[in-house]
Image: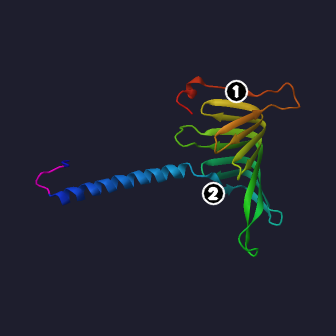
């Protein structure tokens, strides 16, 4: 491709390069939009739920899903035997219009499982516990009772593990009532090269 032709007028030359510049700008803008979609805030993503049965108590803002429950919100997935969803009344400008907003998801299973696929990471974060509590507004997952989290090749186990979704941080605790339990961590040295 010839970018400069001496027989070409200055106006034609500028027009040709302006089209090229606009095309490159649009391509870059599209890539940035896709990257922002992949790192979007989970709280605003819709929550999709599948289960064998559901029971709703609208007055108290509680819905219970039973049997092979699957929840998906953005790049987060929770699988459990039973899931309880708690919602709060979210009033708008007038008292006449109000709606419910999901505040907490409590998943129980043997074990219940949580997965998050991080942007630019080939392997997802896999976590489990017999109880998983997801505080949506806070962006915190609490794994309880035989909890474990496998993150980029390293694994942490303990009685309780908190996973801070937006910060991608983990905090683990042993059972304070049992002196024989401890937090266990397995670090894969090859997975720490080139990571954050």
Q: Of helix, strand and loop, which one carries label 1?
A: strand
The dominant secondary structure in magenta is loop
Look at the numbered disc 2 and give the secondary structure of its residue: helix
Q: Relative to the observer, which residue lies in front, 33 or 72?
A: 33
Looking at the image, do the residues carrying marks 2 and 1 touch, with CB atoms under 8 Å apart?
A: no
Image location (x, y in percent) of residue 75: 60, 48
Q: In the image, is residue 6 part of the stretch drawn in magenta?
A: yes
Q: Residue furthest right?
A: 177
**Viewer-nearest of discs 2 and 1:** 2
Q: Position of residue 143 (x, y in %)?
A: 75, 40
Q: Is residue 94 above or below residue 33?
A: below
Pinpoint residue 193: horizontal percent, then vertical percent.
54, 27
Please tell me how crowded label 2 is: few (under 14), some (14-19), or many (20+) other residues with Cα within 10 Å: few
Residue corresponding to mark 1 = 185
Q: Disc 2 to disc 1, how far (Cα)? A: 33 Å
2 relative position to 101: left or right = left
- State which quarter of the image contains the C terminus: top right
The residue at the point 70 percent across, 42 percent down is 113
Please name whichever residue, 10 or 75, is drawn nearer the observer in this view of the structure.
Answer: 10
Q: Mark on residue 44? A: 2
Identify the residue shown where x is 46% and y is 51%. Answer: 32
Query: In the picture, residue 151 is in which quadrant?
Result: top right
Residue 189: image quadrant is top right
Give how far across and how far down residue 131 sits, in percent: 78, 43
Of marks 2 and 1, which one's residue comes earlier in the chain? 2
Instruction: Tell me, yes or no, whether the highlighted magenta stretch contains residue 33.
Output: no
Q: Which residues are magenta?
A: 4-8
At x 61% / y 52%, what residue is drawn?
41
């Amino acid at each position: 491709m010839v970018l400069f032709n001496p027989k070409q007028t200055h106006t034609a030359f500028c027009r040709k390069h302006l089209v090229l510049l606009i095309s490159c700008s649009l391509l870059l803008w599209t890539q940035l939009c896709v990257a922002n979609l992949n790192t979007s805030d989970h709280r605003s993503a819709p929550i999709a739920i599948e289960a064998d049965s559901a029971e709703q108590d609208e007055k108290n803002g509680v819905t219970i899903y039973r049997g092979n429950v699957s929840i998906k919100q953005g790049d987060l997935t929770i699988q459990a035997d039973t899931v309880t969803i708690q919602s709060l009344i979210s009033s708008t400008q007038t008292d006449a219009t109000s709606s419910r907003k999901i505040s907490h998801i409590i998943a129980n299973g043997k074990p219940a499982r949580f997965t998050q696929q991080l942007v630019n990471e080939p392997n997802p974060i896999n976590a489990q516990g017999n109880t998983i509590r997801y505080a949506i507004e806070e962006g915190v997952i609490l794994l309880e009772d035989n909890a474990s989290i496998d993150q980029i090749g390293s694994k942490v186990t303990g009685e309780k593990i908190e996973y801070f979704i937006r910060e991608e941080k983990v905090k683990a605790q042993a059972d304070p009532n049992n002196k024989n339990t401890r937090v266990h961590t397995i670090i894969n040295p090859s997975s720490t090269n080139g990571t954050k």
